[in-house]
Image (cartoon, grey):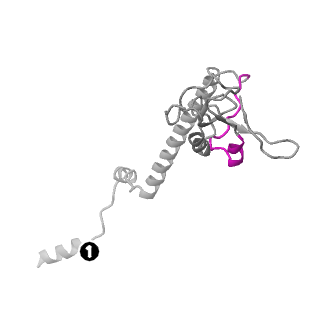
Amino acid sequence: MASRSRILGVANSPPPQRTAVEDSSTATAKPVNSDMVLILATLLCAVICVLGLVTVSRCAWIRRICCRTLVAPPSVSHPPRAANRGLKKKVLKSLPKLTYGEENEYAGKLADDCAICLAEFATGEEIRVLPQCGHGFHVGCIDMWLESHSSCPSCRQIFVTARCQNCGSSPVAASDG
């Protein structure tokens, strides 16, 4: 029966005392809080991202400053171009119509064919001559073109409508060049 009391005695005995050397080794091995690791990792990633963005924006700023000297000087500025949206019907109807083959100011200066449909002009056909550039086209061809474009189909010169300063009406298209 002595063996039974020994087993019971061992189970009820106080835990053995630790030495100072054992206490210092277990004190450094405390469990690490996982929330703190996650917070530190997030802060480190944020700092790296901010530094990267600062570097990229600085490079872009330096490049913009350096490229300004390579571009045309600011004294050479081009006027803004008008939108190529088509002419209003009132302006379109005000463009002059001529009869091909008759004596007029464009006789001998016009091409022999319409640059839109590529058909030759026949004597007696109505053509429309654009006053800004002097190019001539069949009336139907150029009217359809000018409904959706505000430029000459041959030379791409853009027309800007000018309004009368007295009455405010738009008589004839004016050139921007």
Q: How many marks?
A: 1
Work out whether 13 lies above or below 35: below
Q: Give residue 6's position: percent from left, percent from top.
A: 17, 73
Quarter the N terminus occupies = bottom left
Work out whether 107 lies above or below 30: above
Residue holding disc 1: 12
Work out whether 80 lies above or below 147: above
Residue 80 counted in the magenta span? yes
The residue depicted at 64 percent of the width and 39 percent of the height is 150
Q: Give residue 67's position: percent from left, percent from top.
A: 60, 24
Q: Which residues are magenta?
A: 75-94
Front residue of this view, candidates 109 and 116: 109
Left or right, residue 49 beside residue 159:
left
The residue depicted at 68 percent of the width and 48 percent of the height is 89
What is the chief secondary structure element of the magenta stretch? loop
> At numbered mark 1, what does the secondary structure look like: helix, strand or loop?
helix
Left or right, residue 85 beside residue 25:
right
Q: Residue furthest bottom?
A: 1
Q: Is residue 33 visible?
A: no
